[in-house]
Amino acid sequence: MKAIPASAADMRLIGGRLCLDFINTVDGRKSASPRSESGSINRLVLGDKLGEYSDLVEWSRHSGIVTALESGRLIKASKRNAAEARNVFDRAIALREALYRICKATMTGRRPQKVDLEIVNDELLGARTHERLTHMAVGFTWEWVDSEAALDRMLWSIAHSGAELLTTGDLSRLRECGAEECGWLFEDISRNRSRQWCHMQDCGNLAKVRRFRSRLANAAKG
């Protein structure tokens, strides 16, 4: 895990893609059991930065999906519609874990589970009903419509980012932090594809300290 876990509102955004930063809204992950017969690896979440809908909104503001003004409106709307907000939160966690498992399967040369693809596709289907092509001063762009009162508006962008990564991204550059109990994912854009850690000041420095202590211990034994 990170030395000093940060909250959803101020965590490091190191994934290189919105969907990867969303996958990383945990303090860490570790293996929960041996590899299953299907080839998948179960991973336990070590501390979750998303405990309720307000955390999801704060992360969305932090990552730039919504503005500070919009986040305030979403919090107020969630208090008026607590059941719907809870449903959106549950969908967000399901989407996060599905994207994580799909990415892990891709990184290890396995086929993603059908149920995970269905979760992502369900969110994409809902998002696309709010997507419109519009003309800008120069060229065209996609924009979200009917989003002001939608408690799940952040899921549209996350699902879209995940689909974009999986369909047009260079999946050979997907990496998982080399720390034993981190599990954060990122896109390695280094020229020689040598990035090992989510961030040098977190897991990178911890690894250096552990190696140093190990050398001292071995020297003392010698």
Image: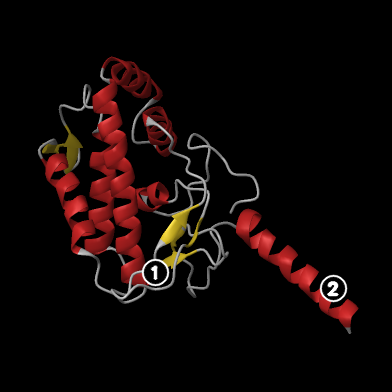
Quadrant housing the N terminus? bottom right
**In the image, residue 4 lies at what x, y percent?**
64, 45
Q: Relative to the observer, which residue lies in front, 50 or 8?
A: 50
State the image coordinates of residue 41 (x, y, percent, origin top left): 38, 68
Residue at 82% from the left image edge and 79% from the top image edge = 218
Q: Are marks 1 and 2 in contact (CB under 8 Å)?
A: no
Q: Hey, what amino acid is under mark 2?
A: Leu
Relative vertical location of residue 84 with respect to residue 73 in this rendering, above or below: below
Against 185, residue 58 (above or below) is above
Left-right relation of 158 to 26: left
- Residue at (26% x, 34% y) in the render: 88
**121 sits left or right of 60 in the view:** left
Q: Quadrant of the C terminus?
A: bottom right
Q: Is residue 164 visible?
A: yes
Q: Which mark is residue 173?
A: 1
Question: Label 1 sits on what residue type?
Answer: Arg
Q: Position of residue 117 (x, y in %)?
A: 20, 58
Kindly identify which residue carries mark 2.
216
**Crowding near pointer 1: few (<14 within 10 Å), some, many (20+)?**
some
